Image (cartoon, grey):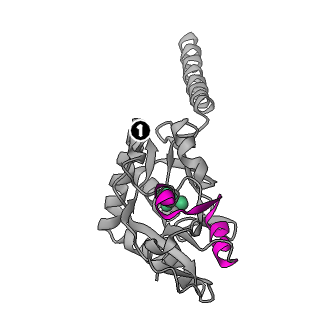
Amino acid sequence: MKRKITTAISILLIIASMFITGCGSKAATGQPNKSIKKYTISTDATYAPFEFEKDNKYVGIDIDLLNEISKLEGFEYELKPMDFKGIIPALTSNQIDGAIAGITITDERKQALDFSDGYFESGLSLVVSKDNNSIKSVDDLMGKKVAIKKGTAGATFAEENKDKYKLSIKYFDDTPSMFQEVVNGNADATFEDYPVIAYEVSVDPNSKLKIAVDKIYKAYYGFTVKKGSNKELIDMFNDGLKKLKDNGEYDKIVKKYIK
Ligand code: ASN
């Protein structure tokens, strides 16, 4: 009888301890599966066809790629859309873990950031209003007003050529406001990436903008993290990207947005 009671107590204790440890690990990590890490990843707030809001949801090539890659590689993320100018400072000050925002891979940025393999061919376009027939090349910008988006590769190009072409530069926080400045006739031109302006004029047949020079230079977009941090995220992005290219999903995602 005594033995039976001891056995019963032992079993109860084992069950109780299993219950306690189970709850304990859940409460300590705040997530049911300890092995899944959650990253904070930023994106541009408005940058179609790469990221934009549709029916209160973020969609676009970058968003779909990130989503598919996270599923394939087994990580979770919280998406933090913000104006592009905030993204690189947020990375370098460790406020976010990574970013996918149609970010051009440049040697200058590589000093502070690590990039994935290039995942989309881009390049910088010179954009003018549809009825402008005098600006056909960068050389035609002498003394002109240009609208640019803060912190972008387009901004760097304008700043580097400011003196050469005596440009007057007006800065904007987002692409739609920058485009609007040219549409309104307050700026003569703007610099934006080829796939972004090509998408804009293709989805809006009444667009008042046109491409004066399609690719002043060619460049690639990369997923990025602060230099020397979150290496596993870059490795997972590259690995997942390769899988999506091999299984045809990458092409499907791009075709969903660019016809
Ligand atoms: N393409 C821009 C750059 O790399 C980023 C952006 O505007 N989202 O500077």
Magenta segment's dominant SS is helix
Left or right, residue 246 beside residue 106: left
The part of the chain drawn in magenta is 160-184
Count of picture labels: 1
**Rendered location of residue 219, percent (x, y):** 37, 62
Look at mark 1 in the image and give the residue it sits on. Answer: 227
Q: Does the residue labelled 1 lie within 8 Å of ligand 1?
A: no
Which of the two residues, 206 or 254, is positioned nearer the viewer here? 206
Magenta segment includes 106:
no
Q: Is residue 1 visible?
A: yes
Q: Which residue lies furthest to the top in this view?
A: 2
**Rendered location of residue 69, percent (x, y):** 43, 57
Q: Say if 130 sits above or below 224 in the image.
A: below
Corner quadrant of residue 89: top right
Q: Say if 81 sits above or below 10 in the image.
A: below
Q: Say if 108 sits above or below 214 in the image.
A: above
Q: What residue type is labelled 1?
A: Lys
Which of the two residues, 206 or 134, is positioned nearer the viewer here? 134
Left or right, residue 96 beside residue 218: right
| Residue at 57% from the left image edge and 84% from the top image edge | 132
Magenta segment includes 164:
yes
Label 1's element? Answer: loop
Q: Residue furthest left?
A: 246
**Rendered location of residue 215, percent (x, y):** 40, 72
**Rendered location of residue 53, percent (x, y):** 65, 67
| Residue at 43% from the left image edge and 39% from the top image edge | 230
